Image (spheres, rainbow, N blue to C red):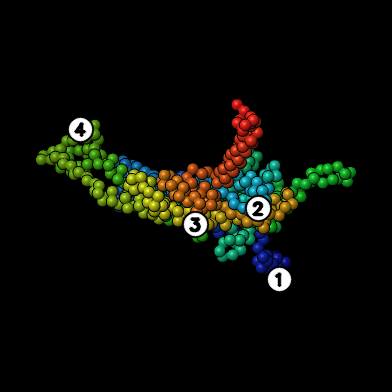
Amino acid sequence: MSTLSEILRNLDENSPMTNKEIAIEQMNTFKATKKYEWMLLGQTYYRNQTKIIDHKRMVIGEGGTLQEATNLANNKLVHGFIRKLVDQKTGYLLSKPFSIQTEAAEAYKNYLHDIFGKQFQRQLKNLGKESINKGIGWLQVYYDEQSNLSFKIIPSQEIVPLWRDNAHTELDAVVRFYEQERYEAKKKIKVTIIEFWDTNGVLRFTMDGLNTTERLADGDRGYHFDVVKKVKDEKGVEILKETPMNWERVPFVPFKYNDEEMPLVEMLKSLVDDYDSRFSDNSNNLEDLPNSIFVVKNYDGADLGEMRHNMTQYRSVKVSGDGGVDTLSLEINTEAFTTHMDRLRKAIYEFGRGVDTQADKFGNSPSGIALRFLYSDLDMDANIIETEFQASLEQLLWFVDQHLYNTTGVDYSEDDVTFLFNRDIVINETEAITNVKDSVGILSEETILANHPWTGDVQEEMDRIEKERKSAMEEDASRQFAFEQKPTVPGGGENE
């Protein structure tokens, strides 16, 4: 017959995992993956903290063991290829304001322009940097203290998504974990905050070592957000009442760099490390080159260290008999080094899908066709990012439509909205303007304006043109009216 403890243990072992247990298990599993490691590397390489920073010059010491040589040059030359390529991609695709196109009511357009204003566009640019560095970026939807719909970028290494499908398009839940400093009495400690988000709300608890303390979320009491409404109390007086609510979806939106969620550093790390290493080695050789190898015969001293000291301080060394000192010069194969570095640089820009601005073709005032060819790899990568980001913006738009329905009572979810990214490509302006002029009467005015190099916001430019046309028409009508009102003298002549 089983004891009570055995029965309880069997029930515990065979019962489903709680959300807290799932969150802890997912966090520990994720932190042990290569994906998590690549995310951290993407961040450090973007900050120019590459592998070469930890490099040490090693020599064979006594007994054949390696030991650090502190007397040799150890230059650590970091090349910010990752940072440049990431900034190049975000600057090319996300630095200019995107356009929002919809045939919906004017009120909906105004709401969208307010929500997706300059603040959001800056967030989108930073979100692009996050996704390229780590393979995926995350935007959390929440309400701020003034009950405004807001968005916040969450570091990707803090998020463990629980996907509903293998294509990673729909979320079942999200586990977020992050460290926080706290004070216990007069002692500062670090604890891990773990959150489990699903459509039923949020569970947040603290983990300190092996101990966990469960508590409801601060502020939202376990719900996603609170709705503040004016209601009347029993005496008929209007008061503000908070009603806790949950979104029908998990309030996190993924923004992927590519479908595989592979960060840029994973594709380029070995090439960048080799470039830094070879460049640093060459610098070390140049620094060590004046200290040629000395060949000493019949040295009259205690050890080689004393000999080097005497040569440095006294510019001389004592030898006996037929002794002497010769030197062996160190030669660097400059041609082989240059060839290897050039090939490495080309490989970094080719597989990083970027534009090498030091390429010879940039110095020859290339035509529009040549520029498009130079930008072809960057453009291809931008197409992939744009496809992923447009799908993510569509998911984000669902939260916006729900917010507008809750606050205005109007359902805009059936209205089509398109987000158009305006790329910041280097062009031959004269050629582009000529092509635009030649397209008048063939293409629509909106398309022509969108392709004119001086156009910032297409809609604003169209509004300006319409305003100028109306002003010109009113001025013509005013002149015509004034002409018709001029008095005439008998005989048909005008009164002067």
Q: Are marks 1 and 2 in contact (CB under 8 Å)?
A: no
Residue 166 x, y percent position in the rendering? 56, 65
Instruction: Determine if residue 340 is in view.
Output: yes
Which residue is located at x 16 percent, y 41 percent?
A: 326
Q: What residue would you read off at disc 2?
A: 104
Residue 346 x, y percent position in the rendering? 35, 52
Between marks 1 and 4, how big is the CA–CA gap? Answer: 91 Å
Q: Which disc is residue 384 wearing? A: 3
Mark nearer the N terminus (3 vs 1): 1
Mark nearer the N terminus (1 vs 2): 1
Residue 205 x, y percent position in the rendering? 66, 51
Q: What residue would you read off at disc 1?
A: 2
For label 3, the crowd category at 10 Å Cα-Cα, with few meaning under 14, some 14 to 19 and many 20 or more, is: some
Residue 224 x, y percent position in the rendering? 69, 52
Where, quadrant-wise, is the N terminus in this rendering? bottom right
Q: Are marks 3 and 2 in contact (CB under 8 Å)?
A: no
> Who is closer to the viewer here, 256 or 12?
256
Compared with residue 161, is residue 75 higher up or lower down, i.e. above or below? above
Between marks 1 and 2, how big is the CA–CA gap? Answer: 69 Å
Mark nearer the N terminus (2 vs 4): 2
